[in-house]
Image (cartoon, rainbow, N blue to C red):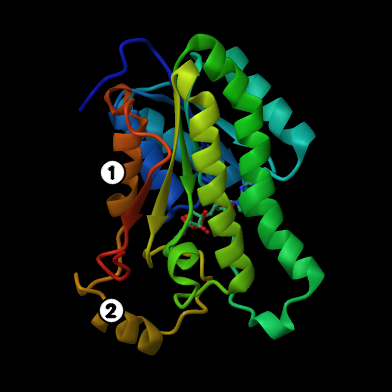
């Protein structure tokens, strides 16, 4: 465990979901000494995460109900975090939605919805916090991409999801180049299939079994598998890693 030298806050979007990657990541970062701003569309879920974090790790927490696609809501949420918590040192762009709709059935509205949450949401929150990070000379930004971006779907998410998650790879890499001189790193984590509720029960057991048989580690990923890598990237000591993509997929895609 590396404790940040100065008190710092991590903003984690989509950290409400009880079985989600965001909540597990919030716990991992809190265990490393970060104070946590939990941002989620679901206010009660965000509050529940914040309560658990405070009770388990004794860090300062703040639950913020905000839609990451709404610029004004993002601005207000981050302003609240800045007023109530230590300076923001880390951002995890975790809020995301997926869709298995086959390409020929995708409507422009479906496409926009997937890009709005995954890409525009990551843009709005990153844009809002990055200036402060650069000014203070410290920042750790992590994006949740996906194995779907690398292998071209084939897990659950379709073309829109794969394209949106691929956009985040370019986003993080270009951002890493621009913000590196200011002490801010930007990296992607690309998980394979992880056991959460993002598929909303639409991935049946037979398909899961077939996929597991094809994964070298012979299991679906756990949220802690992903959270641990994000926590590593968020540490002060990880300051020489930027523009990288960390695969957390049990070997299901090796390249
Ligand atoms: P999840 O559905 O359990 O959690 C997502 C959270 O994001 C929810 O709490 C939801 O309320 C929140 N959210 C959704 N839209 C939002 C918005 N507009 N504004 C604010 N919050 C919003 O999902 P998860 O499986 O924990 O996934 C987390 C991230 O990891 C996503 O970006 C996802 O695409 C990515 N990912 C997941 C998997 C997987 O297999 N679970 C694999 C690869 C990548």
Residue 170 on image: x %, y %: 55, 48
Q: Determine the image quadrant of residue 236.
A: top left
Under 8 Å from ligand 1: the CB of mark 2? no
Of label 1 and label 2, which has the lower sequence position?
2
| Nearer-the-camera pick, 251 or 157 | 251
Q: From what the image shows, is residue 46 above or below residue 100?
A: above
Residue 163 on image: x %, y %: 60, 63
| Number of marks drawn | 2
Callout 2 secondary element: helix
Callout 1 secondary element: helix
Residue 111 on image: x %, y %: 72, 66
Residue 255 on image: x %, y %: 31, 64
| Nearer-the-camera pick, 42 or 87 | 87
Numbered circle sitting on residue 126 = none
Q: From what the image shows, is residue 2 above or below residue 20?
A: above
Residue indicated by mark 1? 228
Is residue 84 at least partly visible in the picture?
yes
Residue indicated by mark 2? 212
Residue at 46% x, 24% y is 180
Residue at 31% x, 11% y is 5
Does the CB distance between marks 1 and 2 fall below 8 Å? no
Residue at 55% x, 57% y is 165
Residue at 64% x, 79% y is 101
Q: In which quarter of the image is the N terminus?
A: top left
Query: Left or right: where does residue 175 sit relative to residue 112?
Result: left
């Amino acid at each position: 465990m590396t404790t940040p030298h100065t008190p710092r806050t991590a903003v984690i979007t989509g950290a409400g979901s009880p079985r989600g990657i965001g909540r597990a990541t919030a716990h991992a970062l809190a265990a490393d000494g970060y104070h946590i701003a939990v941002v989620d569309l679901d206010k009660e879920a965000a509050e529940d995460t914040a309560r658990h974090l405070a009770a388990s790790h004794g860090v300062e927490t703040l639950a913020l109900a905000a839609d990451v696609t709404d610029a004004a809501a993002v601005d207000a949420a981050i302003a609240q975090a800045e007023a109530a918590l230590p300076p923001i040192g880390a951002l995890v762009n975790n809020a995301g939605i997926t869709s298995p709709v086959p390409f020929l059935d995708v409507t422009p509205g479906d496409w926009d919805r997937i890009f709005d949450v995954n890409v525009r949401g990551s843009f709005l929150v990153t844009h809002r916090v990055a200036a402060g990070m650069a000014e203070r000379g410290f920042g750790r930004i992590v994006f949740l991409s996906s194995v779907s971006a690398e292998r071209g779907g084939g897990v659950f998410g379709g073309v829109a999801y794969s394209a949106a998650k691929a956009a985040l790879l370019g986003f993080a890499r270009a951002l890493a180049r621009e913000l590196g001189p200011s002490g801010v790193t930007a990296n992607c984590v690309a998980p394979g299939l992880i056991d959460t509720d993002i598929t909303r029960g639409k991935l049946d057991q037979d398909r899961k079994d077939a996929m597991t048989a094809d994964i070298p580690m012979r299991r679906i990923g756990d949220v802690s598998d992903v959270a641990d890598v994000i926590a590593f990237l968020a540490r002060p000591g990880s300051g020489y890693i930027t523009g990288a993509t960390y695969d957390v997929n049990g070997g299901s895609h090796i390249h």
